[in-house]
Amino acid sequence: MEDSAHSKRSVTVADVAKAAKVSKATAARVLGGYGVVSAKITDKVMAAAAALEYRPNELARSMSTGRSGIIGVVVGDIENAFFSLAVRGISDAARLAGFNVIIANSGEELDAEKSAVDLLIGKRVDGLIVTPARCDSVDHLQHVRRAGVPLVLFDRAIPELDVDAVTGDDRDAAITATRYLIGQGHRRLAYVSAMDAEDGGLTDIGRISNSAVRERVEGFVSVLTEAGLPNPLHYIRLGATNQQQTDSVIKRLLSEGSPPTALLASDSLVGLRIFKSLQSLGLSIPKDVSMISFLDADWTSVTVPPITIVDQRVYEMGKLAGERLIARIERAPLAVERLRVSTSLVVRGSVAAIGR
Amino acid sequence: MEDSAHSKRSVTVADVAKAAKVSKATAARVLGGYGVVSAKITDKVMAAAAALEYRPNELARSMSTGRSGIIGVVVGDIENAFFSLAVRGISDAARLAGFNVIIANSGEELDAEKSAVDLLIGKRVDGLIVTPARCDSVDHLQHVRRAGVPLVLFDRAIPELDVDAVTGDDRDAAITATRYLIGQGHRRLAYVSAMDAEDGGLTDIGRISNSAVRERVEGFVSVLTEAGLPNPLHYIRLGATNQQQTDSVIKRLLSEGSPPTALLASDSLVGLRIFKSLQSLGLSIPKDVSMISFLDADWTSVTVPPITIVDQRVYEMGKLAGERLIARIERAPLAVERLRVSTSLVVRGSVAAIGR
DNA sequence: CTGTATAAAGAGACCGGTCTCACAACATAT
DNA sequence: ATATGTTGTGAGACCGGTCTCTTTATACAG
């Protein structure tokens, strides 16, 4: 079999030039689409290139131009619907501007995030979108800036970093959802997040290293406080990182002396886990417990009852982040900003009105 | 502000060499981790590199080594849980072997797929995993092979291409699911897919350009035939590409003289759409209609009733594809193979037993 | 004390593009 | 006629690494 190509040296401009009997510079002008070349020679070169099946080596091109046409994205977990939707938005924005996307998973681990960032910088991406796993560790991100690579934070902001961030309006979203619950008569509200934590409880809001979660908790707490409810931090629980953890978090919550009547899930994965927990405990939603989840995930609209959610418009967030980054790459004169994509409460059937 | 780095030229081995007062070659040996260098000089170079915050330019490295350390993945739609799970599997396999992943979306469009493939080849990826949108257009994939870039097909096979493919055991899966339905007493079974089609019906199975769908349909039809059921193609419907289309497909199906009693959904997106359609038509599952969906998607386990599914083990498929590709990249002497990942039927509550 | 083996460091070509500059050919101005 | 400008092409440096080949320094044998 002579077709079992053993990776022959690929065709270069020099090869095309030789075949077309012109100089390398001229062939490069035609193939690279720059400079001026006569029509006759253009045709000759194009013909030779087609005959040889020439494909430009983008690597070499990037080396001389200094632009790779790639934007790097570091996300927590592509498997999570939140991120895959965001990536879709980023990709669409990128493609529209002629950029490509290279994705790295951090698994929400700081070390993995650091090496992903390093790697992408090494690949000379033109810009970087990062979902920082922790908002209190900024060295590696600072380095991105010093390297002169445009950076946009996604979903979480780090004020002291002086860099664009695209997030939801997490505080307001939590406030809206919490007010709604209170409006429905609930007085004991729990907030459950997947954030890692030593113990399940929470003593100091300021210590939450994920700004999105922190701001939601702040909003949540502020409403409880303004409503004059006692001990607003009491029902905040972290660590719902998997089904088992969540089961135990929920079980503990509900076996308290005066258990919460409504649960607020920090993201759709936690929401799903809570739903399953409640289901396995034989509890009915919203009769026994009410719940609200973040993100309009697939599952939320087909359960019985359908879940009341905070719609985060993640696709738009992703798209906006992509557009912002590209603007930065193209040196648009913009002030550093925190862009908030507004959310909205989608009332479905998972919250009961409690008589007073 | 002197920190507003205006993209300074980045630090190179030459810079480090100068700072460490050694030759470029020596500095390169230390920084690249090859060749022999004395401990004293190694330290000096490392110190200089650290002081200057040197980061290797992977682009340049790739140019000389001819390896980019990147594997390219072209998927139909990252937003689809099927693909995001697969990408996760691929990424994990890649990371384990020290490769990175660059993802491109084809949107299941042939043209987009072609340009994505071209682009990734241009970026000199070390290998390519492609979910071919159509199994009857092979030119661009043939070109990948001629370029000497290892290729693995994902989810769909193209026999005439003589290239590895990782797929589910689609035929068997469909057979199992269909037999199960028949075993439960169903005699009129419909198969619904999102594949694009001129009209909704199907006349020639061989013409289905997606091998996964084709094989499932073949399995489906073979069981109906062996069971002696008349007109097995009658209830096969394509074109359930969005909610509206699906609504009309389902409405038409169910308003036939003798409507099907069970629906088989070709993937989890179609399954979800069908579920919503049935819901909006006020039909109860499984009392009025039974259904089975492919893929163990989030939503399938929390509906009422939970959905009986064909578990595709997509993560394993992705991982296997990644591993296979890496083996190819590393020139393992392997015969071209079609790797089938076995599926299993997970019986839940969406299929009723029909009295006979 | 010299000869040779060996280890360590330096010099420079190379990968495949881009891009600056030099130069040739021809048109227009003086 | 010579000076000036314009357009198209060629020559070669350059990007930042790798890697081969050569040179220099050190070790040990005779």
Image (cartoon, coloured by chain):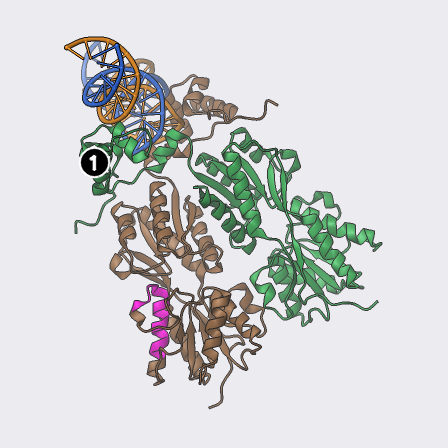
Chain colours: A brown, B green, C orange, D blue
Q: Position of residue B261 (x, y in %)?
A: 76, 64
Q: Position of residue B247 (x, y in %)?
A: 65, 63
Would you say B214 lies left or right of D1 here?
A: right
**Rendered view: B196 above or below B58:** below
Q: Name the main secondary structure of what is drawn in magenta.
A: helix
**Rendered view: A324 above or below D20:** below
Q: Residue at x 27, y 61 (%)?
A: A159
The amino acid marked with disc number 1 is Lys
Q: Position of residue D6 (x, y in %)?
A: 30, 25
Q: Residue at x 48, y 58 (%)?
A: A80
State which quadrant residue A133 falls in.
bottom left
User: Which residue is at the front of the view, C19 or A255?
Assistant: A255
User: Which residue is at the front of the view, A345 or D7?
Assistant: A345
Would you say B223 lies left or right of C16 here?
A: right
Q: Position of residue B239 (x, y in %)?
A: 65, 54
Residue A332 visible within the image:
yes
Mark 1: secondary structure = helix
Q: Which residue is mark 1?
A: B44
Q: Residue at x 41, y 46 (%)?
A: A97
Position of the N terminus of chain A, as image quadrant, is top right
Would you say B274 lies left or right of C9 here?
A: right
User: Which residue is at the front of the view, B146 or A134?
Assistant: A134
Would you say B329 lies left or right of C12 here?
A: right
**Residue lying at the far bottom of the rendered structure:** A356
Question: Can residue A4 be found in the magenta stretch?
Answer: no
Residue segment shown in magenta: A207-223
**Rendered view: A289 above or below A318:** below
User: Badge 1 sits on which subunit?
Assistant: B
Residue B102 visible within the image:
no
**Rendered view: B283 above or below B21:** below
Numbered marks: total: 1
Could you classify mark 1 by the number of other residues whose Cα lies within 10 Å: few (under 14), some (14-19), or many (20 or more)? some
